[in-house]
Amino acid sequence: MHIGRRALGLGAAALIGAAATGWAAVADPVTAFTLDNGLEVVVIEDHRAPAVVHMLWYRVGAADEPPGLSGIAHFLEHLMFKGTDSRAPGEFSAVVESVGGRDNAFTSWDFTAYHQRVSAEYLGLMMAMEADRMANLAFTEAEWLPERDVILEERGEVVESRPGGLFNEQMRAALFQNHPYGVPIIGWRHEMEGLTGAHAMELYAAHYGPNNAVLIVAGDVTPEQVRALAEEHYGPIPPNPAIAPRIRPQEPPHLAGRRLEMTDPRVAQPYVMRQYLAPARRSGDQSEAAALTVLAELLGGSSTTSVLARALTFGEGAPALSASAWYSPVALDDTTFTLAVVPAEGVSLAEAEAAMDAAVARFMEEGVDAAQFERVQTRIRAAEIFGRDSLQARARSMGMALTSGLTVEDVEGWTAALMAVTPDEVMAAAEAVFDRRRSVTGWLKGPEDAAPAAGPRGVEPPVTEVSQ
């Protein structure tokens, strides 16, 4: 349950020249097709090892839940491991483990995904079991009732035990005034306590089916092998007639910026965070999202060379211990662009916020430094190249994109879009996104009369998914 920021080694630059003309020289073949029942299938060939990643993604997540039932998508994800008409509870994972594989699942706002990594010879077995629970999920009250306690305990461990986790929930709830992205993926506790197996089965009946799913298979396979196995195991499942277009409440015009302060005695290090509404990647034209990605890297992508780091964390009397910026480009609807500053000792949160605003204002006035822009593009391209070394990462990025309104062509063209960004486009994107009316600024602090508590120091990244 985390956001990862990818670090690059010095050897990254050696790969840049090889990819200068695009991905054709370094990327493994990607093939896409659709079964008659509506199941979309993507095959990513990688024959370096006799292993496969099998991932089944559903176009339903926390932002698609009925009002008052927050957390039901994640609850259903847990219950998918309880069994089917022909398999006992826990049998799925036990079979995967028995063949030397690993399996898990995770839920986000826009999708729910189930995945296994096994030897290529067991791909058919994974499909058979996954197809079974797509169509034949079954569980009893004796199975779902304890599982509700599990997800409540999970909320306590990963959110309520962490001041930063609670703070992020409050920030997001303040930013999204009407859209369900303001509801935590894991759910609000008071609503989770009322979830039942019947609620889960209603979500399952309304959203699970081949015509609302994307199958990603990456590894030592051919498209012909995957098609034959998919036709055998998934093909007989009829389309679910209950599947409907995703219609969600959208944000009204934001007319005023919001502020919040949260005090928690467990806070070891106060910090300032500001989140802006920002456009996500859009199919067919990813240029604005690409510019925002570069902007986030310029502002906060490096602890030594980024704009905010150089302005706020170096030199005698520097006002901050750390400064960061990040952007979440993959989402079905509008997403977030975030700035955060951890003040130095003796610097108030008000002073840290003022210093952050001044640094951003100088950047907006002076524009993009050419040398820094070149370094950022090198880092971004290297990160994309290294990301393709992992079967899991490639299948994951493809599944996230396809369940969030993008296409295979968009995914394959993302690096080209990033490399096509110009400094002028970065500044135009910054001008558009840094609208204080479409933002929330938050202070997370400890009691003024208390010594700093033991605990994690620094900014806790927002939760973007909850794992099984």
Image (spheres, rainbow, N blue to C red):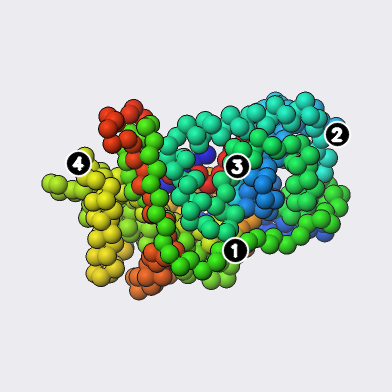
Upstream in sequence: badge 1 or badge 3? 3
Q: Position of residue 249 (x, y in %)?
A: 63, 61
Secondary structure beneath disc 3? loop
Upstream in sequence: badge 4 or badge 2? 2
Q: Which dot, 2 or 1, sits closer to the camera?
A: 1
State the residue in front, 122 or 184.
Answer: 184
Say if 148 sits above or below 374 in the image. Answer: above
Horizontal relation, residue 37 to residue 181: left or right: right
Residue type at the position of mark 2: Asp
Mark 4, residue position: 346
Q: Which dot, 4 or 2, sits closer to the camera?
A: 4
Q: Are marks 4 and 3 in contact (CB under 8 Å)?
A: no
Say if 89 sits above or below 272 in the image. Answer: above
Q: Are marks 2 and 1 in contact (CB under 8 Å)?
A: no
Which class describes the residues within 10 Å of circle 2: few (<14), some (14-19), or many (20+)? few
Look at 86% across and 49% down and name the residue there. 236
Look at 79% across and 39% down and name the residue there. 198
How far is mark 1 from mark 4, CA to CA? 42 Å
Residue 181 showing in the rendered view: yes
Upstream in sequence: badge 2 or badge 3? 2
How far is mark 1 from mark 3, CA to CA? 19 Å
Mark 1, residue position: 250
Q: Position of residue 47 (x, y in %)?
A: 60, 46
Mark 2, residue position: 85
Upstream in sequence: badge 2 or badge 1? 2
Mark 3, residue position: 187
Residue type at the position of mark 3: Gly
